[in-house]
């Protein structure tokens, strides 16, 4: 679904199998790139679109599983007149911030559109943990999953301590596109194949509850966050008259019938057309899902945090990195006692009756992590005149599908937030995705003006299409929230209820909890073919031990990074700052020693194995890795200290 807690996307039949059937060559073998890796930076749009044509015109998805995936991706040519009027790279504010502690505010070098109304300095501030302590529940992670879980537990009288490695809302929640929907990413036809119609019905009900719960909490706490009800439109990716348009329309009709069968307010409209879609491309007709919603995610969560901060049974500690979460003691048949001990990077211990890892992906080596795929998804916020485009949620039916919504800008304009162009972490070019989103938008909405923000976020895709919420595998006191599948905002809100219910000792059988349980087996076994293919594909990424992105550090342009892999030494992650100073770190991801790749769009080092990401200073911004990249020179060591505020 839309980029959401990180919220990012893929609406496709048997997606997990299809993606892994596609053989993708490493970046270096497909493109001759500039010394800065895949960066386009603030180049003009005509050059960007020409570059984009080189990058994508030969990429064809050849999966036999679905005809939707057998056509080439959009091809771009430097002939589109509008791109000369509005530069692709909007403003320098959307590229890497010059603030040396930008890494502590967000997980990318760019800023999302949400800082337009709620800049980082308006986020609640908390101290770093400086002592040992004990509590009822420790919540690790201060995104929507952690904040909502804390809210639900505090409301029930539990003492809660929240721990965050950087600042609150510095992860994927602050980089979502803000869709609130139970029109789930993978579609209920496919979900029913894995979980049965009963499971599909529960998934629809539970995400609808979460969608509504956000509106309820906003109303109870008096938070103004643009929460509003909207219809969601699902359309074909192909224009009317294209040979595959009718086939996708038939698939949408099947999905419509399934959604109606499980109780959703869904209908098919053959004449559906979005108001304001005045471009020449005609994609009318599609599925309409009523009673969906959207909001301003950080405005909402800042409001919840401000309420929590006033509660006597809530504490939050930021810039407090957790290094281990372990159950201690023995408890058998009601005898004995087991607790959770949490160790922080600074050597402090938090003891709790229960712990919740609300960290997007659990801080562990494998287990449930092997049941996830890791993707990047991209967004732009482009100005459109107020009232010129219908206020709705819009999705096309491509594999790397586009998702669209509106949010407030100023008295004259709104922002049209357009996202999509997903790919596996660390395995494809990054910056050219923005050119594709811009071209797609201008061809359909010619009234679109200037791009003010462009950013990306991370999606965690479970192989059986539904997220994991509940006790971690092999644990009795440690809970996890992961596998949001692009629906992270509702998934994280739902997690708050399910985990609070279980910790509170709710004895009523909860079918929702069973559906999302991390220990489930039946649906995972049904997904075994895609699980095996995914495992083979990510293990193939260890080939980077034999590859080097650069042959000489001198080849790097200022503001760029890459991996230097000498034959006689360990691979180095190299970043050359804007002043030409070089900073080096180990290129081995601390999780399972994959060799990281340079991400030009976010100025980060990304691991292609299990999706861990590190800022240009080597700071871990996305798990499952817990530690930073080790500095290999004094410059790297100093940079890391400055980034975390230690120097």
Image (cartoon, rainbow, N blue to C red):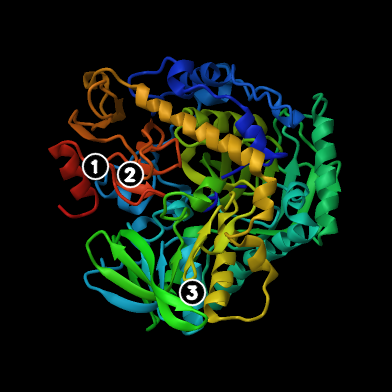
Category of crowding for the residue at label 1, using alpha-carbon neighbours closer than 10 angstroms: few (below 14), some (14–19), many (at least 20): many
Q: Are marks 1 and 2 in contact (CB under 8 Å)?
A: yes
Category of crowding for the residue at label 3, using alpha-carbon neighbours closer than 10 angstroms: few (below 14), some (14–19), many (at least 20): many
- Quadrant for residue 604, please give it: top left
The structure residue drawn at horizontal position 38% and vertical position 65%, both measured from the top left corner, is: 326
Please tell me whether residue 340 is drawn above or below residue 195 in the rendered image.
below
Q: Give the spatial CA distance, label 2 vs label 3.
A: 32 Å
Q: Are marks 2 and 3 in contact (CB under 8 Å)?
A: no
Q: Give the spatial CA distance, label 1 vs label 3.
A: 36 Å
Q: Nearer the viewer, mark 2 or mark 3?
A: 2
Q: Nearer the viewer, mark 1 or mark 3?
A: 1
User: What x and y, as percent, mark residue 78?
Assistant: 54, 17
Sequence order check, earlier mark of 2 and 3? 3
Q: Nearer the viewer, residue 91 or 634?
A: 634
Sequence order check, earlier mark of 1 and 2? 2
| Residue 152 marker | none
Left or right side of 114 for 526 = right
Category of crowding for the residue at label 2, using alpha-carbon neighbours closer than 10 angstroms: few (below 14), some (14–19), many (at least 20): many
Q: Are marks 1 and 3 in contact (CB under 8 Å)?
A: no
Left or right side of 373 for 169 = left
Q: Nearer the viewer, residue 454 or 388?
A: 454
On the question of residue 164 being in view, the answer is no
On the image, numbered disc 2 is attached to which residue?
Answer: 590
User: What secondary structure is found at the residue carrying circle 3?
Assistant: helix
Please tell me whether residue 256 is drawn above or below residue 549 in the rendered image.
below
On the question of residue 588 being in view, the answer is yes
User: What secondary structure is found at the residue carrying circle 1?
Assistant: loop
Sequence order check, earlier mark of 1 and 3? 3
User: What x and y, as percent, mark residue 474?
Assistant: 50, 62
Please tell me whether residue 38 is drawn above or below residue 54 in the rendered image.
below
| Residue 630 marker | 1
On the image, numbered disc 3 is attached to which residue?
Answer: 151
């Amino acid at each position: 679904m839309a980029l959401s807690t990180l919220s990012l996307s893929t609406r496709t039949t048997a997606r997990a199998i299809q993606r892994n059937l596609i053989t993708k060559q490493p970046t270096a073998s497909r493109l001759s790139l500039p010394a800065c890796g895949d960066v386009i930076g603030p180049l003009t749009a005509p050059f960007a679109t020409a570059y984009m044509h080189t990058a994508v015109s030969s990429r064809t998805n050849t999966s036999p599983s679905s005809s939707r995936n057998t056509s080439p991706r959009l091809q771009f040519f430097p002939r589109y007149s509008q791109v000369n009027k509005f530069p692709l790279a909007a403003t320098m504010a959307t590229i890497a911030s010059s603030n040396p502690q930008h890494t502590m505010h967000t997980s990318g070098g760019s800023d999302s559109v949400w800082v337009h109304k709620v800049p980082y300095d308006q986020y609640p501030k908390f101290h770093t943990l400086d002592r040992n302590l004990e509590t009822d529940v420790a919540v690790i992670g201060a995104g929507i999953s952690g904040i909502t879980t804390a809210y639900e537990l505090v409301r029930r009288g539990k003492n809660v301590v929240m721990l965050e490695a950087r600042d609150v809302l510095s992860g994927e929640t602050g980089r979502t596109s803000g869709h609130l929907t139970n029109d789930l990413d993978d579609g209920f036809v496919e979900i029913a194949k894995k979980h049965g119609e009963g499971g599909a019905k529960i998934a629809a009900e539970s995400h609808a509850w979460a969608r509504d719960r956000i509106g309820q909490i906003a109303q109870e706490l008096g938070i103004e966050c643009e929460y509003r009800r909207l219809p969601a439109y699902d359309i074909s990716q192909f224009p009317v008259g294209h040979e595959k348009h009718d086939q996708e329309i038939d698939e949408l009709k099947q999905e419509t019938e399934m959604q109606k069968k499980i109780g959703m307010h869904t209908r098919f409209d053959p004449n559906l057309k979005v108001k304001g879609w005045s471009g020449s491309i005609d994609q009318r007709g599609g599925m309409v899902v009523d009673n969906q919603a959207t909001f301003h995610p950080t405005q909402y969560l800042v409001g919840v945090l401000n309420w929590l901060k006033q509660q006597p049974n809530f504490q939050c500690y930021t810039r407090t990195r957790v290094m281990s979460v372990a159950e201690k003691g023995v408890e058998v048949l009601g005898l004995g006692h087991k607790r959770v001990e949490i160790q922080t990077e600074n050597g402090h211990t938090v003891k709790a009756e229960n712990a919740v890892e609300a960290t997007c992906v659990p801080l562990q080596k494998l287990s449930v992590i092997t049941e996830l795929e890791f993707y990047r998804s991209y967004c732009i916020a482009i100005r459109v005149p107020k009232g010129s485009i219908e206020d709705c949620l819009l999705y096309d039916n491509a594999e790397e599908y586009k998702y669209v919504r509106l949010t407030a800008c100023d008295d004259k304009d709104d922002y049209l937030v357009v996202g999509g162009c997903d790919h596996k972490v660390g395995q494809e070019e990054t910056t050219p995705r923005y050119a594709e989103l811009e071209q797609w938008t201008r061809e359909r909405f010619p009234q679109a003006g200037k791009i003010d923000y462009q950013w990306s976020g991370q999606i965690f895709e479970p192989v059986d299409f539904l997220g994991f919420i509940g006790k971690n595998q092999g644990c009795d006191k440690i809970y996890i929230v992961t596998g949001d599948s692009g629906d992270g905002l509702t998934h994280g809100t739902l997690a708050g209820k399910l985990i609070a219910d279980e910790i509170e000792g709710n004895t009523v059988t909860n079918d929702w909890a069973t559906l999302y349980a991390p220990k489930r087996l039946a649906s995972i076994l049904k997904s075994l073919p895609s699980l095996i293919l995914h495992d083979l594909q990510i293990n193939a990424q260890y080939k980077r031990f034999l590859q080097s992105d650069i042959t000489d550090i001198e080849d790097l342009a200022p503001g760029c990074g890459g991996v230097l892999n000498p034959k006689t030494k360990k691979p180095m992650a190299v970043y050359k700052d804007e002043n030409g100073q070089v900073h080096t770190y180990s290129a081995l991801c601390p999780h399972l020693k994959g060799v990281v790749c340079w991400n030009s769009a976010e100025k980060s080092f990304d691991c292609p194995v299990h999706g861990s990401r590190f800022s240009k200073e080597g700071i871990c911004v996305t798990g499952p890795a817990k530690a930073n990249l080790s500095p290999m020179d004094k410059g790297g060591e100093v940079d890391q200290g400055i980034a975390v505020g230690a120097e």
